[in-house]
Image (cartoon, helix red, strand yellow):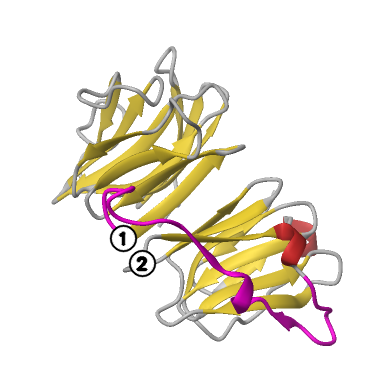
Amino acid sequence: MSFVDDNLLQWVDDNELQWGLELGAELRQVWHDDYYIYAATSEGLDIIDIDSEQPFAYVTYSGGFTTVWGNDTSIYVGTSDAGIKYFGKSSISGSIYNPADLSVALTMYAEYPTITSNNVRYIHGQENLLMCCTASGVDTLGVYGKEAKTSTPYAQKCFLAPSERLYYTTASGSEHAINRVSGPYDWNTPDKTYLNDGTIFESGIEFNDIFVNGTIIYTATSNGVYSIDDDTDDFLIYFTGA
C-alpha cells in the first residue's frame, strides 16, 4: 500500500519501510504503476523510480498540474487553465543520476468544449476510458459511445470503477456528497447519493478523497476514513483521533 503524507509533502510506502522525498513544490496528487511514482506538483510532474526511491525524470509546466492518472500506455495530467495533457510511457527516459526533462513529450489530450472546463480538478479512469472533474462539471471520454458529461460547479474528486460505476464527490458550502452513476450515459439524476447529513457520514464533515474496491467505497474525510458497502450500506469508520 502507498499513501501521501500531505503534511510532509512526501510519498511513503509501507509502515515498516517508510521513506520520504522533499519535492520542493506543493504536492497535489500521486499516482503509481509498477515502476514509477508520478507526483503532480505546483511546478509540474516528478517521476520517481520505485526501486531506487530517487528522481528519474520530470515535466516542468507553468502553474503545475492539478492531478495525475495513467494507464498501460499513457500518463494524463490536468491543468487549471488548459485542459488535460498527456504523454506516452514509451517516452519516459532518464536515470537516477541524470533525470530527464520530458516536457517536449507533453501533448494536448482534451480541452473545452470537449470537456466541460479547462480547469481540471481530478482525473481517474479504467484502461482507455477517462473520467474527470472540472470547475464546470464531470466528463467521461476516450471510448466512443461512452462519452458523456454533466454540468455542476461543485464536483471535486472522482473514481471510475472497473464495473463502470462512476463515483464523484461534490462540495457546496457545508454540504458534501458522494454521487454514483451506474454507467457513463445518463447524468441527470445520480443513481445513489451519500450526504454528510448524519445518516452514514457525520454531519458537516468534509470529503477529501475517494477510492472504490469492488462494492466498497473508501472516503477520506476531515474526521477519519469511512468504508461503505455500496450494495448494502454497511459501513465502518476509522477515526483520526484527537
The residue nearer to you, when weighing 189 against 236, is: 189
Main SS, magenta region, reads loop
Question: Is disc 2 in contact with disc 1, using a CB cutoff of under 8 Å?
Answer: yes
Which residue range is magenta in the image? 93-119
The spot of residue 156 in percent (x, y) is 32, 50
Total labels drawn: 2
Q: Give me the residue at 21% from left, 48% from top.
A: 154
Hey, which quadrant is residue 146 in on the image? top left
The numbered disc on residue 82 is 2
Above or below, 169 relative to 231: below
Q: Residues within 10 Å of mark 2 (few under 14, many from 20)?
A: some
The spot of residue 58 in percent (x, y) is 65, 77
Q: Give me the residue at 83% from left, 80% from top.
A: 96
Any magenta on residue 87?
A: no
Q: Is residue 69 left or right of residue 207?
A: right
Provide the residue designation for mark 1. 118
Can you say which quadrant of the picture contains the C terminus?
A: bottom left
Q: Is residue 47 left or right of residue 118?
A: right
The numbered disc on residue 75 is none
The residue nearer to you, when weighing 172 against 233, is: 172
